[in-house]
Amino acid sequence: MDPKLLLRRELGRPQGHALHLSEGLARKLAVEAVLDGHDGCVNRLAWNEDGSMLATASDDCQVILWHYPDTGRVPIALQTQHHANLFGVAFLPQHNNSRIVSGAMDYTVQLHELDAGAFSIQPKYRSSSSGGNGSRGGMRRHPPAPQLHQVVPRTSVYHCHKSRVKEVEVCPQEPHLFWSAGEDGMVRQYDTRLADQKAYGSPNVLINLATAGPRAGLVECKGLDVNVANPNMMTVACGDPYVRVFDRRRVGTDRPGKPTTPALLQLSAPHLPLLLKAGLSRRAHATHASFSSRGDRLVASYHGDHAYVFDITGAGEQAPLVLPQHSSRLRQQPSAAAAASRTPGHLGSSSSNSTAASAAAAAAAAAAAARDRSSPAEPPTNLPEAAEAAKRAGNTALFEQRYTAAVADFSAAVAAAPWVPGLYTQRALAWLKRAWEGDAAFALRDCEMALALVQQARGAAAAAAAAAEQQARLRQVHALKQLGQSQCALAALESYLRHFPHVADSSELASLRELLQSSVQQRRDFRAKMQQQRQHLLQRQAQQQQLRRQLAQEQLERQRDTTAAAAAAAAAAAAAAAAATADGDEEQRRQRRAAAYLRDAPPAAAAAAAAAAAAVVDAAVESGSDSDAEGGGGSDSSGPAAAAAAA
């Protein structure tokens, strides 16, 4: 471990890829073999049932099956039908490694089936040039490109998600079922014995969190795990600060659009909802969750934070964080952390290491015993030898600014003497000095525990408890300040000054009060500004809606006018056509009458009519010439003369 990384993290300075693993655990790890075969980032690992084969999923859209412990054998590379990065892989149990499930960024889940010969016809060992022999002595950090046995499996593609698939999971007791979790907020259940489950509208939605967020917003599913000890229990790592636990017996599969699935448990580290509500962190979300082998604990890792262990049996449950009341509004409403912890199934307890967890459990037991007034026994006034030694070591670590060691030392002291409030206040100071993500919440909890023990102190312990109370109240103010609860911190500071008026003239406390008042005022101004912006946005939306209604009305009126004009034009055209038809019929009748007149008239009358017709024609020709010269039109003739001329 690089000591510079540890130092930068303890000081709270940015460090790029942050260190999220304890040095003691890291020293226990050793590189056994380097499995070199992928052309992209490896995103997920999965063991088969007996641990003899490891599946790796990568950005190169391949799934490679590695043999273990004989890592020198040629691995099997499955050519999937994915078109983007693979985020999930798992062996379907009880199928002799012949069925592998994968999920990817291309929104699809795929089931790959291998023939029995895929494991028998492959070359047994790599060539010596590949450098992979499975032993530590012959291991090479960067061997040449290894041999891979390429296999094209039979693949079933499921298009059930509308966003990235982040996890696929199986259950050892279920050889035909597997599940997928996607960023569309849905967990899908697949049964290899059923057919209707390959489309988005398939009735295989097991968990729906698409409307589980604030204001019915989307909660993405980031991880998924099934409790091996209790296969009916399933956990989902979500895109908000919570990890949700579900009982499969209480939920059924349905089509998309089913109501939000209620969670059996809703777990979070105590500081994450507070930071999110205070606007100090928008990145806090779970990335993965996994049950312990016994099924009684759940570990969750967080983006930009630590990994936390939750006791899902309730045996290690602690009281939620209680924030000081700062106004009449808060006297009517519970604090954010308390409200979150009172959510059905929420457990307020979490721990980033086992030492802190055991110490917190011991402290809870001590507080419960202290609150039991029927117990006649009083705690001893002197510290046990182990607690005294741990306390001295913790104070030395604080002086040398080794805050992680100080937290561990004071945790050991608390475990040895959980009835001493001063140990909690010292550990709270170590938490505050270290200032890692979540440390302020643990410091606040230690202050609450110390104050609870102070209230129960009797006899000779009351004098020592008074000094611990002053430290606890002051460090409570600083813890609330780090959590972004400025108004609660200001209320706690006022309470501290009322309890200890002899420190009211302190310049440090005056500066702290001014800083908190300024922060509270800034928050009020920000909220007022946001309220104005919200009102302005609502007004703009109302104006836009009114404008849209006006435009729709105008368009409707234009359509009506256009329709009326078209109807009038059609009526006029019909009338003109009818008039033209009537004129044509009248002309035909005149022609028929003229023909009948010429046919029945005597010769003298016919000659006279012909002469009259010729005169009419000459006049018409002369008139037509004049009209052509003037740009006008000719004249029509009618009657018997015109008919005679035409004849």
Image (cartoon, rainbow, N blue to C red):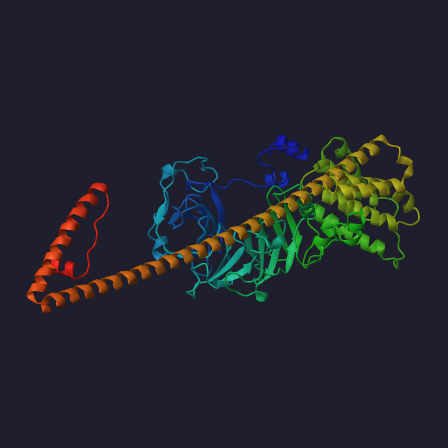
- Considering every residue shown, the one lying at the far right of the view is 459
Q: Quadrant of residue 505?
A: top right
Q: Quadrant of the C terminus?
A: bottom left
Give coordinates of residue 603: x percent, y percent. 6, 65
At x 77%, y 45%, the residue is 446
Q: Is residue 418 left or right of residue 631?
A: right
Foreground of the two, 296 or 318: 318
Give coordinates of residue 602: x percent, y percent. 8, 67
Number of marks in the rendered image: 0
Foreground of the two, 618 or 636: 618
Q: Is residue 311 visible?
A: yes
Give coordinates of residue 451: x percent, y percent. 83, 47
Foreground of the two, 69 or 372: 372
Q: Is residue 45 left or right of residue 393?
A: left
Q: Quadrant of the N terminus?
A: top right
At x 19%, y 47%, the residue is 623
- Considering every residue shown, the one lying at the far left of the view is 603
Q: Is residue 98 visible?
A: no
Give coordinates of residue 415: x percent, y percent. 76, 47
Q: Is residue 38 left or right of residue 445?
A: left
At x 88%, y 35%, the residue is 504
